[in-house]
Image (cartoon, rainbow, N blue to C red):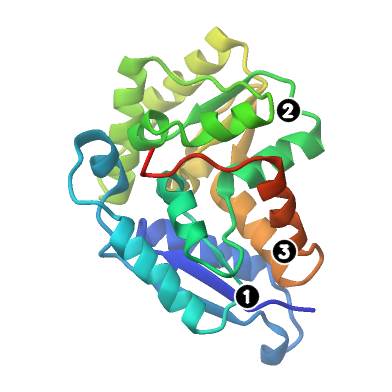
Amino acid sequence: MEKFVGILGGMGTDATTYFYKKLMELDVAENDQDHLKIMLYNNSKIPDRTNYILYREESPLEELLHSSEILESTGVDFITLPCNTAHCFYDDLNFNLRIPLLNIVYEVILDLTKKGKNKGKIGLIATKGTIAADVYKKMFKSYDLEIVYPLETDQDFVNDFIYRIKMKKKLEFEKFNNTLKNFSLENNLDVIILGCTELSLVLNKLNFENCEVIDSNYLLANRTYIYAKGIEDVNQVYKTMINDCRFSGSSKD
């Protein structure tokens, strides 16, 4: 049975557009009526997640909660959140919802396990906020997985690169690709996770040498489609997640 999908977007808007486009590419249909029923709320006014985590600027939690409540009130069956850093607030949001909230980190773990990559060396490319809040590391620890971060000097550049994507500014692809290459080689990585949905927008210009890449934004779109079409039961999958571990990325930590 198909599900009514809620998308909590706006972090940023281009990353949300990419997510929606990929979801629609997956949703092949013979006529208009066969397409998925989707409610997309692109709240571009949600305060910056990284600035809150690092500098305790305005908290995004109130807007995130309000946005999730708006979506739930429309009758959606589950909500998907195409922003990695916002998962710092996953517990707070999930606690206030009566419907499943997809967890991008959990979906990455499921994908790694399915591919047999969960015992390999795994690296994360993400915002400073995602790194500082240990959005990935906390859940990975629950599944006995280790994850490697770039060196601090490289992380500064990665964060700047991500924000330049957001601002549509000129990007230093050669330097970024060299950073990816050194990160992979120095840590003997098997997998690099693109743990920021903005990076999906420039994926075709990134080089990963012999390292497999997981695009978290595309992966989330793919899993959203699977749940929406009823190929897998979203309620059962997320009941399993809750039983396995309580995601501890709460802003109250």
In the image, 79 versus 90, the foreground residue is 90
| Residue that label 2 marks | 118
Count residues near mark 3 (Cα–Cα under 10 Å), then give few for <14, some for 14-19, many for 20+.
Answer: some
Q: Is residue 161 above or below residue 89?
A: above
| Dot 1: element | loop
Q: Is residue 172 visible?
A: no
Q: Earlier in the sequence, mark 2 or mark 3?
A: 2
Q: Amino acid at mark 2?
A: Asn
View extreme (top): residue: 186
In the image, 212 versus 103, the foreground residue is 103
What distance separates the C-alpha of mark 3 from that of mark 1? 9 Å
Res 235 label: 3
Q: Say if mark 1 contacts mark 2, CB within 8 Å.
A: no
In the image, 3 versus 37, the foreground residue is 3
In the image, 251 versus 64, the foreground residue is 251
Q: Amino acid at mark 1?
A: Asp
| Dot 2: element | loop
Horizontal relation, residue 128 to residue 73: left or right: left
Res 77 label: 1
Q: Amino acid at mark 3?
A: Asn
What distance separates the C-alpha of mark 2 from that of mark 3? 24 Å
| Dot 3: element | helix
Q: Is residue 179 above or below residue 84?
A: above
Image coords of residue 14 (percent x, y): 39, 59
Q: Is residue 31 above or below residue 11?
A: below
